[in-house]
Image (cartoon, grey):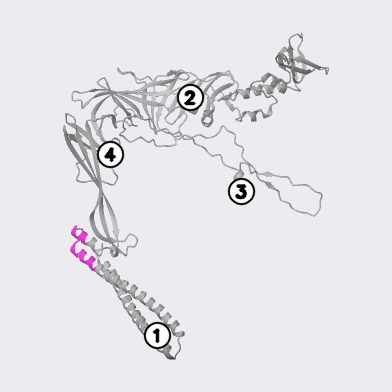
Amino acid sequence: MGSLPVREMVLYKHGVGFFVRQGQVDGNEVELVFRQDEIDDVLKSLAVFDQSGGQVLGIHYQTPMDRHHRLDSTSIRLSSSNSLRDLLESLSGRQVELTVSGFAEPISGRMVGLEQLEATPYPQPSKRHLVTIQMESGQIRVVDLEAVQALHITDAQASADLTYFLDTSMSEDVRRTIRVRLNDQEQHDVLVYYVAPTATWRVSYRIVAEAQEDRASGDLLLQAWGLFDNRLDEDLEDVNLTMVAGQPISFIYRLYESQIPQRATVKDTARIAPGPIEFAGVEIEEHSEGVKGNNRADALYLLEAQPEETSRGPASSASVQFDDRFQAEESVVAADMPALRRMSRGQASQAGPAQAEGKESAEFFQYVVTTPLNVKRGESAMVPIINSDLVYERILLYNGRKFRRHPVAAIRFVNHSGLTLERGPVTVIEDGEYRGEAVIPFTQPDAEVFVPFAAELGIVITEEQFQGSTTASISIGKNIFDPNLRQLVEQRYNHITVTHTIENNSDRDRVVTIEMPTRQNWTLFNTPDPDVETAEVRRWRVLATQRDTTTLVVQERRLTALQHSIKSLTERQLVDWLEGQWLDQATFDALSDILTTLQGLSHAKAEQKRLRDRRKSLYERQEQLRQNLGALSTDGDEARLRRQMLDQLEEAENEVIEIGRRIDELAAQIRAGNTQVEQMIADLNRGG
């Protein structure tokens, strides 16, 4: 049996590693040992090849059950405190052989049991343990346990049970062993690939800068170190290391744990003597435990992949990051199984060797360490991966969303290193002095990098923001829901004005770069052109004179459209639009005529409502008079009162008739007015 050393590691940022093991194996079996939290990923990805022409016959691992379930099939049960006594008791009825002091020959026979006796009650109580053996002759032999020097289990099953118990107890360790069986061959060259969880690799940067005399620019050395951990239970010797910037899709799929689906139980029908012929159906008894719902189909369930999320928040830093965070595009990657890589050594620079070379790989970027590494078990290591001389510019950068009141001193450079920069912290040293710290964002080659490392307290910047809207134009158009209807379309500008007041309290003029986000669908107006404009930000360079105050006003606007129903307009709106010259006089007059007609219709409708209310009250009055007339006689004073009520009833009826006539007239006027309004609206801006 042999073991395979690690030859190559490929570490990813999202917490997995791709491992390659390779070595010569004598015999027909090789063991791979993993931690329990790695086993699911290993079973999902493990691939084994015999490069010497042999065959891989199978891969075996212990069935995952808890300790109690695994020991259900064994007769041996041992506790942690009384293992010898427990063993002797478990061997009851089994053939054993005892070596006892004072006896020339071993005692052989069947184990009866272990007895416990009170030996000496005074001065201190003590106990004796006696081992009872049944000899082949049937004689019972009792031996003091303290005299037993050796125990030989001659019963094969009991001996196997003890071995299984000890193996099972050992498997309670957090490690799991996978055995690869090979064909019978003297020597095998075995190559193994697998994916396993591992600590994410990290990167940290150093910027060592030398400023020119004007202190506005200079040269810098950008140095990056990759950090990784050896979490394996072995030393790493001559291992090729690759660190990958990117995020392939990865998840945990529960393969190690056994799954036994629930099934329905069918009972056999009772058999009785022949009689009348009947056809009886089977009786289904459902498992209620562990199965949700009453549908028998619920007994069959799917095993779902259960990805476990690990939240990796941004590295905390006292500095301010100004560039947007890179978000890796997730994609499924399928690739042929690579052969062992042969790495070449990179040339060392005078400032220090960068032992890695960059390599594009589909959706990822790789830092391939060119020198094989040696790392002890439980240790971590740092590997130089970037060492590049660059030119930089020193600027003051202000973004109120990220750091208020003061600009930050920042180093700006273009990533001409030829390598992709992974996100990580950076320490800035300028002219031999510590300046501050920042975070370098994920940056592609030839992209601009800003490293803000300190706040400039000598400059104070305040922001005032105003939002409003103004009318841009008025037109007559079609209704978006009904093209046959006309409506008034008002185009308005929503605008935002931000005033930056820059107060320079220092003794020299400074150039401050004001940065603002680029708003989608918003355009600048009455504003100086920005010095830099991208899809994400706009930047203005503003000269702030010493001991003085300077302002930068940035105005943005976005065109929107409001649709007004012509019938809902007011005279005040028309007057405002006419005064603002959004309407010409002819359109104003036409709309005013429509409003006048609509006002007349409104008055007619109001009069209709008043007349209907009056008619309703008259109906109620007439009903009351009729009830009172029914209670009066035709003689005497009641006759006179009756005539008065009849006169009132007649007057009410005449008024009801007149109201009905007037309501009909108003209805005709309203119909005619509506027709006139529709025609007037249709005549507005024909063809618009």
Q: CA distance from mark 1 to mark 2?
A: 115 Å
- Quick one: label 2 or label 4, which is nearer the N terminus? 2
Examine the image and state in which quarter residue 684 appears. bottom left
Viewport quadrant of the N terminus: top right
Q: Which residue is mark 1?
A: 645
Residue range in magenta is 575-593
- Quick one: label 3 or label 1, which is nearer the N terminus? 3
Q: Judging from the image, what secondary structure is the residue with disc 2 in?
A: strand
Q: Which residue is mark 4?
A: 537
- Quick one: label 1 or label 2, which is nearer the N terminus? 2
Q: Is residue 265 visible?
A: yes
Horizontal and vertical percent for residue 356?
Answer: 37, 23
Viewport quadrant of the C terminus: bottom left
Check residue 579 for magenta coloring. yes
Amino acid beneath label 4: Val
Q: CA distance from mark 1 to mark 4?
A: 88 Å
Are the residues tagged 3 and 4 within 8 Å (C-beta)? no
* Identity of the residue drawn at 22% across and 32% down: 459
Q: CA distance from mark 2 to mark 3?
A: 48 Å
Amino acid beneath label 3: Asn
Is residue 187 depicted above or below 559 in this figure?
Answer: above
Q: Which residue is mark 2?
A: 20
Between marks 2 and 3 in the image, the one whose residue lies nearer the viewer: 3
Horizontal and vertical percent for residue 275?
Answer: 81, 53
Q: CA distance from mark 2 to mark 4?
A: 44 Å
Q: Which residue is mark 3?
A: 295
Q: Judging from the image, what secondary structure is the residue with disc 1 in?
A: helix
